[in-house]
Image (tube, rainbow, N blue to C red):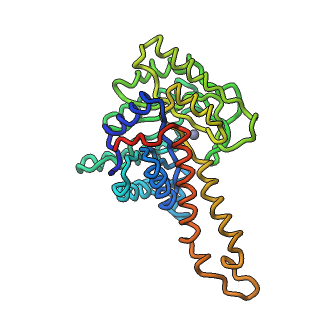
Amino acid sequence: MPIANYETYCKMIDRAKERHFAYPAINVSSLTTANAVLRGLAESKSDGIIQVSTGGGAFASGSLVKDMALGAISIAEHVHRVAGRYPIFVALHTDHCQAKALDTYVIPLIQETERRRAAGLPNLFNSHMFDGSDLPLKENLDIAADLLDRCHRNELILEIEAGVVGGEEDGVKGEISEKLYTTPEDTLAVAQRLGTGKKARYLLAATFGNVHGVYKPGHVKLRPSVLRECQDAVEREYGKEARFDLVFHGGSGSTVEEIREAVDYGVVKMNIDTDTQYAFTRAIADHMFRNYSGVLKVDGEVGNKKNYDPRSYMTTAEAALAERVKQAVQELRGAGTSLY
Ligand SMILES: [Zn+2]
């Protein structure tokens, strides 16, 4: 199917919320990783989300160019071209963008969508994340309110974050503290400022002890019940329809029970990066260890071209990443749920 349009994307989210499942949102940084996600989703008969981080975009543009917006456009255009070959819907999203990077990442990408819309073409991305969690909440929401207006005019969904995700992603280090737990007061402030999604739709990354990257068990306590408290608070104030569309960040290493509890409280999108990175690299490491004398020219030998052709191990890595996507879909109860 082609990339989901705004209407389909909204339907995807509503369906997940109604049926208590969630979409994996997988970070990609190359054609191969994007293709792997499409394969994993298609083999699961699940729709899903492909996302590009600022670092992923910079990487995709080439190490000499390092233009995060350009690389993200390039990946998105690739996915637009090939998505039609897979019998599922996929949405394109951009991951964490802090206020200081808006002018070099999210804004040029919205401009690109505006250009495309003016020419009668579909949007480039379906949604963008603004991460103002390092700012005071009022400042975070001031910026979010402006962005939400502009996104809404262009049928884009905005993802925002209240509370802080700990750990490290793309070199941005989050602290580990009480701020890792969003409070009902924070989320009420979000609803008050941005509305309850009826007018302009947004996704909320509320935090409940999430940490980016992988830590050994017990490092931080995940408390999915924080999400329930936030949803109850907004429902009391604004009614059932106002319950948030939540995003789960920093979920690597979570148990299936924790993941499903979060989904039961209204998580519709779960970001996955660390676990798929590992699955991809694990397959390459395996290839290198098994074919040591083929990938290297040892002791004057010539190696084995079949082994060091990057396509050989990248194909294996693509399949391994696709398998990890399938596991994520299962954990999120998404198998067989495609709208297609
Ligand atoms: Zn995140």
Indicate left or right for 304 with 125 as reference.
right
Q: Nearer the viewer, residue 27 or 110?
A: 27
Q: Nearer the viewer, residue 139 or 325?
A: 325
Task: In the displayed orientation, state which residue is furthest to the bottom.
Answer: 300
> Is residue 281 shown above or below 171?
below
> Is residue 103 shown above or below 310?
above
Task: In the displayed orientation, state which residue is furthest to the top.
Answer: 236
Task: In the displayed orientation, state which residue is furthest to the front.
Answer: 336
Indicate left or right for 202 with 121 as reference.
right
Q: Nearer the viewer, residue 212 or 260?
A: 260
Q: Residue at x 62, y 54 (%)?
A: 279
User: Which quadrant of the picture is home to ligand 1?
Assistant: top right
Name the quarter where the C terminus is drawn.
Answer: top left
Residue 80 at x, y = what percent?
36, 55
Residue 309 at x, y = what percent?
57, 76
Residue 143 at x, y = what percent?
46, 31
Whether residue 173 is visible, yes or no, is: no
Indicate left or right for 174 with 216 as reference.
left
